[in-house]
Image (cartoon, helix red, strand yellow):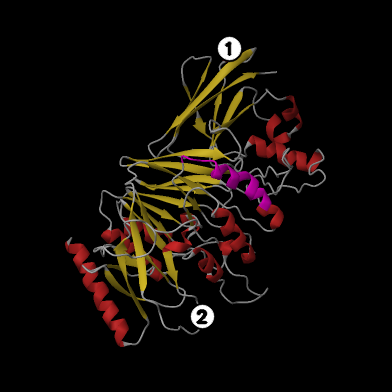
Amino acid sequence: MRGLKTLLFITTAICSLVSLYGQNHIEGIVYDDRNGNGQRERGERPLRNIPVSNGDTIVLTDRKGHFELPIQPGQSVFAIAPAGRRTVSNGTASGYFFHLPDNDTVGPLPSLSFALAPCETHEKFRMAAVGDMQVDNRDELAYAQRTVLSELSGRSDVAFSLMMGDLVNDNHLLLRPVDTLLRLLPHPVWCVVGNHDLDAVPRGSRQPRLHREFCNVFGAADYIFDFGPVRFVVLDNNSHGFGGRFTDNQLRLIRNVIAITPNRQQLVFAFHVPLAATENGSDLLDLLGNRPALILSAHLHTIERHIWRPGIAELIVGATCGSWWVGERDPDAVPVALQQCGSPRNYFLIDFSADGYRFTFKGVGLDKTRQMEFWISGEEIIDREIPALREIPVGTVAVNLYGGCETSQVEMSVDGDEWIPMVRTPMVAPTVSRVAYWNRHAGYPTKFSRRIPLRRTASPHIWTAQLPDQAMQGPHLLRVRATDEYGLSVEQSRIFTIR
């Protein structure tokens, strides 16, 4: 509590200094919207000690529910609804924010009212972390509409979706059509800004690419929201190039939110560019210290997991467009778009409780039990034509464990016999080697399809082992199980015959 009072004193002092120098301020109230209609009515009292932020500074409302914050063009103001309350809005998160457009002049500022309605405390809940849809045109928008978005529309088990950036592919005119589709989902949708969601600039221009249109549509690029026992911190860490960077304002926001977040409350940081590709990503780790946190990112169109230190894990969630909506088409005329790591187009389901989290890979349009891909040397005759695969000893089992990482323990069992440890092995996913070979030699791509730009890049989540001698003839049942302390626990089986 002492640290919180110090933070509030510093924030108040900063606000006073800013006021002296004539910078814009905005004020408002947060109130108890008992009937959830978004309008303050008789008997709906103000709420005190509610955090309100501009994406940099955080203040708490006073006993009259009042707050005041400095604000600059391009910033968004939002209230952080605590457990047991929700900000009144529908559809995507745009209704949760007041966004001040990034223009040269600022007119009179309104007095804001944030309505917080009572809701369930959600001690346990499931969210969907949805990586790059990256639609480039109306055709690709239609692919997303009839695959991943239709699938999410039928999920009654998801409390909300978090879109992890690159909703579009350098076509900000598609942001509003995407928003229209997201509003059709039966649950709230929060959005992270990706590098391909930024405003277009003239070719060869040195102008920075900004997130003006993204914020106009979705409300904010840097914000915080609570759901159940979890606090989510969403940041725009996109830089001008392929990599990323946290700004000084964002680092200040991170420092402030850590200071006001109780140790018992779980922290999740969500941004588009992975931490390893963020120039000053170590600054986030320094601010966290030994505090546990889950980091969610996307951007790479592959699935990866990294354990940065005990308790701090990152999940790079893959892409729902896979390899940019290209490749051979399935019977529904949607490109298969296999990802470079060998994973199908996907998103992740993450289950939170007071005890932590657990995640599940979900292939778009695939059964929920599909958590890995089995490949066994000698099982498929076609593989003898593919140089990258025919050199692998017969009886080698390669398991592409989509959600695996360096701490995962992976084992296999044949016909119910003893469990055999498998070894994490950097190698090109066998399915990737197949498609890459067919692209060059077997008539891919066919008419109406585009070639997947696959490379000989090792997948980060493949484990291998050798079959026992008795499994080299006749049909057998192979089972594989995998666990780790960061939310992975899966098992899958398949019947095979070496030929």
For image coordinates 33% across by 46% down, the residue present is 120
Q: In the image, residue 31 lies at what x, y percent?
A: 30, 64
Towards the viewer: 221 or 403: 221
- At numbered mark 2, what does the secondary structure look like: helix, strand or loop? loop
Residue 470's disc number: 1
Residue 188: x %, y % from top left: 46, 52
Residue 410 makes an appearance in the image:
no
Identity of the residue drawn at 77% across and 46% down: 449
Q: Considering the numbered disc 1 on the image, is that residue within a helix, a strand or a loop?
A: helix
Question: Which quadrant holds residue 388?
Answer: top right
Give the crowd class for mark 1: few <14, some 14-19, many >=20 residues within 10 Å. few
Image point 65% across, 42% down: which residue? 338
**Mark 1–mark 2 contact, CB under 8 Å?**
no
Q: Is residue 327 left or right of residue 470?
A: right
Residue 4, x across and y down, in percent: 22, 63
| Magenta stretch in the rendered image | 142-157
Q: What label sits on residue 103 in the rendered view? A: 2
Location of residue 18 (image quadrant)? bottom left
Task: Point out the frontmost of discs 1 and 2.
Answer: 2
